[in-house]
Amino acid sequence: MTEQDPRKQRSRARLLDAATTLLAKGGTEAVTIDAVTALAKVARATLYRHFGNGTELVAAAFGRLIPPAPTVSEEGDLRDQLVELMVSQATLIESAPMHVTAMCWLGMGPALEDYSSAAALESDKPELRTLRQTIVEQYRAAFDRIFGTPEAAERLGEFDYDLALAQLVGPLVFTRLATLTPLGREACERIVDDFLAARAAQIASRPSPVIAEVPPAQAL
């Protein structure tokens, strides 16, 4: 049989459907080999032909629950693009079971350490690469494009990229985890404005470079 065998594709799809259902309803503890194979009506031996272990299966299911990366127009200035991206992120986070997937991510503990490392992209485990790439795409790719523009370089200066993502996306994720009222456009605009104002204030507070005075040349 080859990877394109329809029976093999169907069995893999059933396994992923079962694992994703269990993960969304009961977290990582619910995604056991016995529970998945029973719900999918697939033999254990078949499961191990698709996934090396239970962790890989959970990673594949987790990747399914992560919403797709938002697309943002390149029109408008830095603020406009950041606001549009934030609004898109807020919608995706609210529409997806992110509170479940986030708790699942934390619940994996040491077993998932490799999935969050840079080495994951070079691994020969397809599920590990897929999960890592999905997360990178979801949370960083759109910001990479916006922060990589000349306007961003001028207005933001040098800054901690990870901290910037936490400042921008953090309130959206916290709101979802805490089951608070979803943040709308006005809140997203305030988050972006506060971020830009903080960056502007930090740049303005930096001391100007001191230019040494060069004495006039001595007359011969």
Image: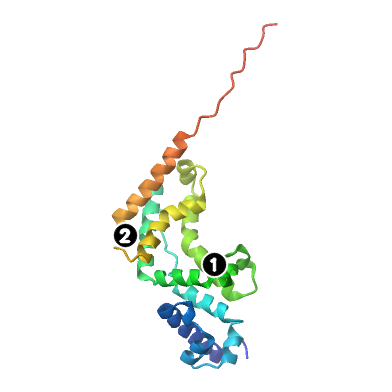
Colouring: rainbow
Please indicate, yes or no, whether residue 3 appears anywhere in the rendered image: no
SS category of the residue bearing label 1: helix
Q: Which residue is mark 1?
A: 133
Against 78, residue 201 (above or below) is above
Within 10 angstroms of label 2, few (less than 14), some, or many (20 or more) residues?
some
Please indicate, yes or no, whether residue 110 appears anywhere in the rendered image: yes
Mark 1: amino acid? Gln
Viewer-nearest of discs 1 and 2: 2
Q: x%, y% of residue 24? A: 42, 78
In the figure, is residue 78 to the left or right of 150?
left
Mark 2: amino acid? Leu
Say which of 87 and 77 sits in front: 87
Within 10 angstroms of label 1, few (less than 14), some, or many (20 or more) residues?
some
**Residue under the point 53% across and 86% down:** 33
Question: Residue 183 got which mark?
Answer: 2
**Residue under the point 57% across and 24% down:** 211
Which one is earlier in the sequence, the residue at label 1 or at label 2?
1
In the figure, is residue 21 to the left or right of 213?
left
Question: Residue 178 got which mark?
Answer: none
Q: Are marks 1 and 2 in contact (CB under 8 Å)?
A: no
Q: x%, y% of residue 57? A: 54, 80
Quote the CA–CA distance across marks 1 and 2.
27 Å
Q: x%, y% of residue 31? A: 49, 82
